[in-house]
Image: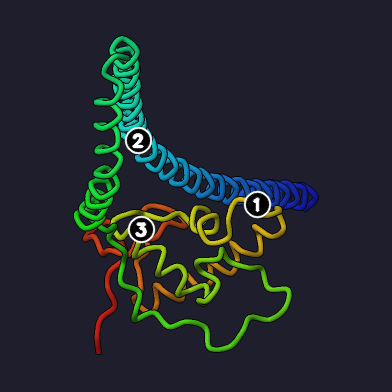
């Protein structure tokens, strides 16, 4: 009987050891899954930043090229003015004729430049802006102490501000961190950023349930205005 009791005690101890190992493995598995979610969020955020930096770089290159072209034209005009000055100094004997021509140029230049400016204004294309006439503004003021949005979004609720932001770039995938920066700016303290992210996260989830935008699959905290089959969550079924 003593041997049987000893065997039973050893078996129970072995069972308890496996229970402890199982709990430890479950904790490690949960930690690994959380780390994977964090890495997915970071990858999505950095991919979005890289895409935005690429677009910004292209715009910067085009602006630099336009600036260089304008500078070249300015140098050519300055060289032309210098050459005219030299000719005027060499032809001092014909001063009266040059003065007469100068007076004619002074009289005709304003009207010409005015007409040119009018033509340029009439032909310059106006930038396209998204239609937000159907998005209502706040009917009541915000509570004192509420974290303020950027000036262009202050008259709207957080949810409607997100909708305006997505309509400005309907084909872009928005990470929640980027949405917070676009709505509140880059000067938030860590506590303010945490509060803003919580509020924006709630509104994003509510907007998905209402069919205002879609959640991007295989990514954590990424949303977009346009439905993409196999890429975003499915549209709501109309009853």
**Residue ranking furthest to the right:** 2
> Which residue corresponds to the image point at 38% horizontal and 35% vertical from the top-left?
60
Residue designated by label 2:
63
Residues at marks 1 and 2, CA–CA distance in whole angstroms: 27 Å
Q: What is the C-alpha distance between the residues marked 1 and 3?
A: 28 Å
Q: For marks 1 and 2, give the one nearer the viewer.
A: 2
230 lies left or right of 195: left
Q: Residue at x 24, y 31 (%)?
A: 101
Q: Nearer the viewer, residue 24 or 56?
A: 56
Spatial CA distance of label 2 from label 3 is 33 Å
x%, y% of residue 66? 31, 32
What numbered label is drawn on residue 216?
3
Q: Element at badge 1?
A: loop
Q: In front of the other: label 2 or label 3?
A: 2
Decide which of 205, 95 is in the foreground and name it: 95
Left or right: 138 as drawn, with respect to 88: right
The C terminus lies in quadrant: bottom left
Picture quarter containing residue 233?
bottom left
Q: Which residue is mark 1?
A: 187
* Circle 1 or circle 3, nearest the eye: 1
Q: Quick one: label 1 or label 2, which is nearer the N terminus?
A: 2
Q: Position of residue 176 (x, y in %)?
A: 49, 57
Q: Position of residue 86 (x, y in %)?
A: 33, 12
The disc, 1 or 3, on the residue closer to the chain's N-terminal end is 1
Q: Position of residue 182 (x, y in %)?
A: 50, 57
Earlier-in-chain disc, 2 versus 3: 2
Task: Provide the secondary structure element on which disc 3 rests.
Answer: loop
- SS class, disc 2: helix
Label 1 with label 3: CB-CB less than 8 Å: no
Q: Nearer the viewer, residue 131 or 221?
A: 131
Give the side of residue 190 with respect to residue 218, left or right.
Answer: right
């Amino acid at each position: 009987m003593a041997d049987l009791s000893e065997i039973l005690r050893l078996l129970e101890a072995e069972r308890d050891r496996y229970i402890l190992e199982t709990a430890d493995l479950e904790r490690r598995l949960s930690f690994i899954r959380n780390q994977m979610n964090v890495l997915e969020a970071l990858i999505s955020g950095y991919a979005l930043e890289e895409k935005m930096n690429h677009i910004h770089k292209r715009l910067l290159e085009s602006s630099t090229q336009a600036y260089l072209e304008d500078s070249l034209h300015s140098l050519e005009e300055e060289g032309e003015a210098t050459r005219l000055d030299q000719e005027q100094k060499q032809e001092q004997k014909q001063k009266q004729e040059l003065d007469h021509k100068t007076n004619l140029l002074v009289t005709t230049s304003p009207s010409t430049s005015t007409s040119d400016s009018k033509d340029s204004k009439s032909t310059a294309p106006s930038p396209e802006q998204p239609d937000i006439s159907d998005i209502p503004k706040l009917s009541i003021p915000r509570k004192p102490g509420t974290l303020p949005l950027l000036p262009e979004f202050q008259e709207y609720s957080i949810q409607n501000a997100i909708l305006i932001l997505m309509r400005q770039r309907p084909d872009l995938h928005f990470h929640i961190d980027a949405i917070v920066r676009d709505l509140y700016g880059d000067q938030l303290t860590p506590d303010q950023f945490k509060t803003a992210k919580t509020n924006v996260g709630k509104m994003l989830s509510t907007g998905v349930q209402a069919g205002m935008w879609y959640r991007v699959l295989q990514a954590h905290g990424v949303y977009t205005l346009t439905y993409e089959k196999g890429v975003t969550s499915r549209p709501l079924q109309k009853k």
